[in-house]
Amino acid sequence: MHERLPSMGSACFILADSDGTDCDASLQEMRIRRCRGCVRCLTEHPGICEIDDRFTELIPVILAHSELRISVAPEHGKVPDRARKAIERLSNILDAYTDCGGNVPLPADSVDLRRITVAYRGNFEDRMESEITGALRKGPVSDVDFIYFEN
């Protein structure tokens, strides 16, 4: 078990693994579907995902906090698939706050999210920092940070 990350203002804390820590949501308990590339979150109803799963319900909660903190432990030395799917889905929602695809961006000040912190717990072969930063530093999010804990 690890210490809960220190609070910095209003933060939504989610786990991509199960370690018994209290949190706002545990991805371990969710069946997160992959984005199917419909782009309706950009074209038909900007900023709203139409996939019917529990992660879609979590997106407005994430956007209503100034910071998202994700705790990640490795699976076979890699970032777990459920964390990858969550990052991909959130990335696509954040695109609605940019001019991606030539769309008129939603105003960044309509949501509170500004910072995402990924806490790595354990030994990873590939942490995917550059991919995660590129996927999440856009729209209202100006800071994507990483912190590291050993087992």
Image: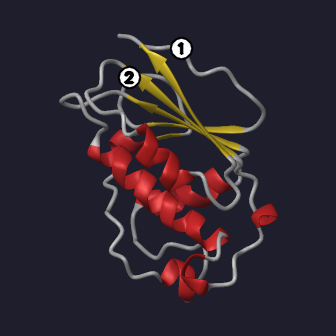
Q: Would you identify the image quadrant in which residue 101 lies?
A: bottom right
The quadrant in which the C terminus is found is: top left
Q: SS at mark 2?
A: loop
Relative horizontal placement of residue 142, taking residue 110 as reference (left or right): left
| Left/right of residue 20 with respect to residue 23 in the rendered view | left
Give the residue type that dot 1 points to. Answer: Glu
Outermost residue toward the bottom?
Answer: 44
Q: Which residue is mark 2?
A: 19
In space, the residues marked 1 and 2 are separated at their CA atoms by 10 Å
Query: Considering depth in this image, is 106 or 135 the residue closer to the camera?
Result: 135
Q: Position of residue 56 (x, y in %)?
A: 48, 63
Residue drawn at (71%, 48%) of the image? 114
The answer to whether marks 1 and 2 mark residues whose Cβ atoms lie closer than 8 Å is no
Q: Which mark is residue 3?
A: 1
Query: Which mark is first along the chain, 2 or 1?
Result: 1
Q: Is residue 18 above or below residue 64?
A: above
Q: Residues within 10 Å of mark 1 (few under 14, many from 20)?
A: few
Residue 33 coordinates in the image, percent (x, y): 32, 62
User: Residue 123: x and y, percent?
Assistant: 30, 19
Q: Residues within 10 Å of mark 2 (few under 14, many from 20)?
A: few
| Residue ID at (44%, 52%) | 87
